[in-house]
Amino acid sequence: DAKTTQPPSMDCAEGRAANLPCNHSTISGNEYVYWYRQIHSQGPQYIIHGLKNNETNEMASLIITEDRKSSTLILPHATLRDTAVYYCIVRVADFGNEKLTFGTGTRLTIIP
Amino acid sequence: GAVVSQHPSRVICKSGTSVKIECRSLDFQATTMFWYRQFPKQSLMLMATSNEGSKATYEQGVEKDKFLINHASLTLSTLTVTSAHPEDSSFYICSAIAGPPGTQYFGPGTRLLVL
Protein backbone atom coordinates (compact mmCIF):
# COMPACT_ATOMS: atom_id res chain seq x y z
CA ASP A 1 0.00 0.00 0.00
CA ALA A 2 1.14 3.51 -0.78
CA LYS A 3 2.36 5.68 2.06
CA THR A 4 0.46 8.82 3.03
CA THR A 5 1.60 12.05 4.66
CA GLN A 6 -0.70 14.10 6.86
CA PRO A 7 -0.07 17.09 9.13
CA PRO A 8 0.11 15.92 12.74
CA SER A 9 -2.44 18.41 14.01
CA MET A 10 -4.89 21.10 12.95
CA ASP A 11 -7.35 23.44 14.60
CA CYS A 12 -10.64 24.63 13.16
CA ALA A 13 -13.27 27.01 14.50
CA GLU A 14 -16.66 25.54 15.24
CA GLY A 15 -19.09 26.10 12.36
CA ARG A 16 -16.35 26.60 9.79
CA ALA A 17 -15.26 24.10 7.15
CA ALA A 18 -12.42 21.83 8.19
CA ASN A 19 -10.07 20.95 5.32
CA LEU A 20 -7.74 18.05 6.04
CA PRO A 21 -4.98 17.44 3.47
CA CYS A 22 -3.30 14.17 2.60
CA ASN A 23 -0.37 13.55 0.28
CA HIS A 24 -0.09 10.19 -1.46
CA SER A 25 2.37 10.85 -4.25
CA THR A 26 3.18 7.16 -4.84
CA ILE A 27 -0.42 6.04 -5.22
CA SER A 28 -1.03 3.40 -7.88
CA GLY A 29 -3.77 3.48 -10.46
CA ASN A 30 -5.87 0.85 -8.71
CA GLU A 31 -5.56 2.25 -5.20
CA TYR A 32 -8.42 4.00 -3.48
CA VAL A 33 -8.21 6.80 -0.90
CA TYR A 34 -10.02 6.01 2.35
CA TRP A 35 -10.70 8.29 5.29
CA TYR A 36 -11.42 7.14 8.82
CA ARG A 37 -11.57 9.04 12.07
CA GLN A 38 -11.09 7.95 15.65
CA ILE A 39 -12.68 9.82 18.48
CA HIS A 40 -10.88 9.37 21.78
CA SER A 41 -11.21 5.87 23.26
CA GLN A 42 -13.47 4.64 20.45
CA GLY A 43 -13.00 2.45 17.41
CA PRO A 44 -12.31 4.15 14.07
CA GLN A 45 -15.31 5.35 12.07
CA TYR A 46 -15.47 5.07 8.29
CA ILE A 47 -16.02 8.43 6.63
CA ILE A 48 -15.63 8.22 2.88
CA HIS A 49 -13.53 6.78 0.08
CA GLY A 50 -12.83 7.53 -3.57
CA LEU A 51 -10.75 6.52 -6.58
CA LYS A 52 -10.61 9.42 -9.05
CA ASN A 53 -13.75 11.49 -8.81
CA ASN A 54 -14.71 13.75 -5.97
CA GLU A 55 -17.12 12.14 -3.55
CA THR A 56 -19.68 13.48 -1.10
CA ASN A 57 -21.81 11.84 1.54
CA GLU A 58 -23.71 12.93 4.62
CA MET A 59 -20.52 13.24 6.64
CA ALA A 60 -17.97 14.83 4.35
CA SER A 61 -16.63 15.57 0.90
CA LEU A 62 -13.48 14.10 -0.61
CA ILE A 63 -11.58 16.09 -3.21
CA ILE A 64 -8.92 14.17 -5.14
CA THR A 65 -6.50 16.06 -7.38
CA GLU A 66 -6.40 15.19 -11.04
CA ASP A 67 -2.98 13.53 -10.73
CA ARG A 68 -4.30 11.67 -7.64
CA LYS A 69 -1.18 12.53 -5.68
CA SER A 70 -3.10 14.33 -2.97
CA SER A 71 -6.58 14.68 -1.56
CA THR A 72 -8.53 16.80 0.89
CA LEU A 73 -11.25 15.74 3.27
CA ILE A 74 -13.76 18.50 3.91
CA LEU A 75 -16.08 18.63 6.89
CA PRO A 76 -18.40 21.44 5.77
CA HIS A 77 -19.61 22.72 9.14
CA ALA A 78 -17.38 21.44 11.89
CA THR A 79 -18.85 20.78 15.32
CA LEU A 80 -17.16 19.99 18.61
CA ARG A 81 -18.02 16.32 18.05
CA ASP A 82 -15.74 16.31 15.01
CA THR A 83 -12.69 16.57 17.27
CA ALA A 84 -10.80 13.35 16.49
CA VAL A 85 -7.76 11.84 14.80
CA TYR A 86 -8.35 11.58 11.06
CA TYR A 87 -6.60 8.88 9.06
CA CYS A 88 -6.01 8.95 5.32
CA ILE A 89 -5.28 5.49 3.91
CA VAL A 90 -4.63 4.43 0.35
CA ARG A 91 -5.04 0.86 -0.69
CA VAL A 92 -6.16 -1.54 -3.34
CA ALA A 93 -9.78 -2.51 -2.89
CA ASP A 94 -10.19 -6.12 -3.85
CA PHE A 95 -11.56 -9.19 -2.14
CA GLY A 96 -8.93 -11.08 -0.22
CA ASN A 97 -6.69 -8.07 0.26
CA GLU A 98 -8.52 -5.70 2.52
CA LYS A 99 -5.88 -5.00 5.16
CA LEU A 100 -5.68 -1.39 6.31
CA THR A 101 -2.42 0.18 7.42
CA PHE A 102 -2.94 3.13 9.74
CA GLY A 103 -0.42 5.95 9.86
CA THR A 104 -0.28 8.59 12.56
CA GLY A 105 -3.14 10.68 11.15
CA THR A 106 -4.11 14.30 11.81
CA ARG A 107 -5.39 15.30 15.21
CA LEU A 108 -8.20 17.78 14.45
CA THR A 109 -9.35 20.00 17.28
CA ILE A 110 -12.52 22.02 16.86
CA ILE A 111 -12.34 25.26 18.77
CA PRO A 112 -15.58 26.68 20.28
CA GLY B 1 -23.44 2.04 8.05
CA ALA B 2 -22.78 -1.50 9.20
CA VAL B 3 -22.61 -2.08 12.96
CA VAL B 4 -19.91 -4.04 14.75
CA SER B 5 -20.06 -4.69 18.47
CA GLN B 6 -17.46 -5.85 20.97
CA HIS B 7 -17.79 -7.39 24.38
CA PRO B 8 -16.66 -6.59 26.96
CA SER B 9 -15.93 -2.90 26.58
CA ARG B 10 -13.32 -3.06 29.31
CA VAL B 11 -11.80 -5.81 31.39
CA ILE B 12 -9.36 -5.99 34.26
CA CYS B 13 -7.65 -9.27 34.96
CA LYS B 14 -4.79 -10.71 36.95
CA SER B 15 -1.51 -11.59 35.35
CA GLY B 16 -1.48 -15.19 34.11
CA THR B 17 -5.19 -15.44 33.39
CA SER B 18 -6.84 -15.63 29.98
CA VAL B 19 -9.29 -13.11 28.58
CA LYS B 20 -11.76 -13.61 25.74
CA ILE B 21 -13.00 -10.69 23.64
CA GLU B 22 -15.97 -11.09 21.30
CA CYS B 23 -16.52 -9.24 18.04
CA ARG B 24 -19.92 -9.42 16.35
CA SER B 25 -21.28 -8.07 13.11
CA LEU B 26 -24.84 -7.11 14.01
CA ASP B 27 -26.61 -6.49 10.72
CA PHE B 28 -24.43 -8.24 8.17
CA GLN B 29 -22.36 -11.34 7.68
CA ALA B 30 -18.59 -11.11 7.62
CA THR B 31 -16.36 -13.84 6.28
CA THR B 32 -13.35 -11.76 7.23
CA MET B 33 -12.73 -9.83 10.41
CA PHE B 34 -9.61 -8.08 11.63
CA TRP B 35 -8.09 -7.62 15.06
CA TYR B 36 -6.05 -4.53 15.92
CA ARG B 37 -4.20 -3.36 19.00
CA GLN B 38 -3.59 0.23 19.98
CA PHE B 39 -1.24 1.39 22.72
CA PRO B 40 -1.65 4.86 24.28
CA LYS B 41 -0.81 7.73 21.93
CA GLN B 42 -0.05 5.30 19.09
CA SER B 43 -1.86 4.30 15.94
CA LEU B 44 -3.71 1.06 15.34
CA MET B 45 -1.57 -1.97 14.57
CA LEU B 46 -3.07 -4.94 12.77
CA MET B 47 -2.61 -8.15 14.72
CA ALA B 48 -4.38 -10.74 12.60
CA THR B 49 -6.95 -11.45 9.94
CA SER B 50 -9.75 -13.74 11.04
CA ASN B 51 -11.35 -15.93 8.38
CA GLU B 52 -14.60 -17.77 8.93
CA GLY B 53 -14.07 -21.52 8.93
CA SER B 54 -10.29 -21.39 8.61
CA LYS B 55 -7.19 -20.45 10.54
CA ALA B 56 -6.40 -16.83 11.23
CA THR B 57 -3.50 -15.11 9.51
CA TYR B 58 -1.19 -13.36 11.95
CA GLU B 59 1.00 -10.34 11.28
CA GLN B 60 4.71 -10.61 11.76
CA GLY B 61 5.70 -10.48 15.41
CA VAL B 62 2.27 -11.46 16.76
CA GLU B 63 2.35 -14.73 18.72
CA LYS B 64 -0.44 -16.96 17.45
CA ASP B 65 -0.30 -19.19 20.54
CA LYS B 66 -0.79 -16.19 22.79
CA PHE B 67 -3.52 -14.48 20.84
CA LEU B 68 -5.99 -17.21 19.87
CA ILE B 69 -8.52 -16.26 17.25
CA ASN B 70 -11.67 -18.22 16.46
CA HIS B 71 -14.11 -17.23 13.71
CA ALA B 72 -16.73 -19.92 14.08
CA SER B 73 -19.63 -18.16 12.40
CA LEU B 74 -20.27 -15.42 9.88
CA THR B 75 -21.12 -12.96 12.62
CA LEU B 76 -18.71 -13.77 15.44
CA SER B 77 -14.96 -13.72 15.91
CA THR B 78 -13.26 -14.10 19.27
CA LEU B 79 -9.80 -13.11 20.44
CA THR B 80 -8.43 -14.85 23.50
CA VAL B 81 -5.40 -13.38 25.20
CA THR B 82 -3.82 -16.33 26.94
CA SER B 83 -1.67 -16.03 30.05
CA ALA B 84 -2.03 -12.26 29.98
CA HIS B 85 0.78 -10.07 31.30
CA PRO B 86 0.84 -6.35 32.09
CA GLU B 87 2.49 -5.61 28.74
CA ASP B 88 -0.63 -6.99 27.04
CA SER B 89 -2.63 -4.12 28.49
CA SER B 90 -3.95 -2.25 25.48
CA PHE B 91 -7.00 -1.21 23.48
CA TYR B 92 -8.13 -4.09 21.27
CA ILE B 93 -10.33 -3.25 18.29
CA CYS B 94 -11.97 -5.51 15.75
CA SER B 95 -13.34 -4.70 12.33
CA ALA B 96 -15.36 -6.43 9.64
CA ILE B 97 -15.87 -5.85 5.96
CA ALA B 98 -19.30 -4.85 4.68
CA GLY B 99 -20.24 -3.50 1.33
CA PRO B 100 -17.57 -2.51 -1.20
CA PRO B 101 -14.18 -4.21 -0.85
CA GLY B 102 -11.84 -2.39 1.47
CA THR B 103 -14.54 -0.75 3.54
CA GLN B 104 -14.01 -1.89 7.08
CA TYR B 105 -16.36 -1.08 9.94
CA PHE B 106 -14.88 -1.06 13.40
CA GLY B 107 -16.14 -2.11 16.77
CA PRO B 108 -16.03 0.26 19.75
CA GLY B 109 -12.95 -1.43 21.19
CA THR B 110 -12.10 -3.35 24.37
CA ARG B 111 -9.76 -1.86 26.91
CA LEU B 112 -7.73 -4.56 28.65
CA LEU B 113 -5.83 -3.90 31.85
CA VAL B 114 -3.66 -6.70 33.21
CA LEU B 115 -2.56 -6.24 36.81
Image: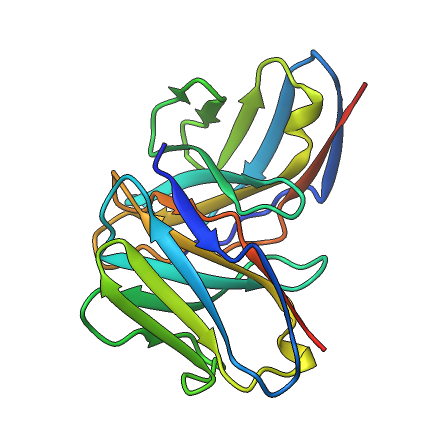
Residue A100 drawn above or below residue B86: above
The C terminus of chain A: image quadrant: top right
Q: Position of residue A42 (x, y in %)?
A: 59, 46
Q: Is residue A27 visible?
A: no
Placement of B74 over or under A73, stated as above or below: below
Residue drawn 58% across the image and 82% down it:
B84
User: From this viewpoint, which residue is outermost toward the left?
Assistant: B53
Residue B83 location in percent, x, y?
Answer: 55, 87
Left or right: A100 in relation to B9: left
* Residue B54 lies in quadrant: bottom left
Q: Which residue is drawn at 28% across and 42% down?
A: B98
Residue B107: x and y in percent read 46, 49
Give the answer, above or below, for where A80 lies relative to B64: above
Nearer the observer, A90 or B88: B88
B98 vs A1, left or right, is left
Q: Can residue A70 be seen in this view?
A: yes
Q: Residue at x 49, y 22 (%)?
A: A59
Q: At which x and y percent is residue A64?
A: 44, 28
Number of on-image labels? 0
Q: In which quarter of the image is residue A79?
A: top right
Colour option used: rainbow
Depth check: give the residue in front, B86 or A14: B86
Q: Is residue A58 above or below residue B36?
A: above
Q: In which quadrant of the rendered image does the N terminus of chain A lie?
A: bottom left
Left or right, A91 with reference to B107: left
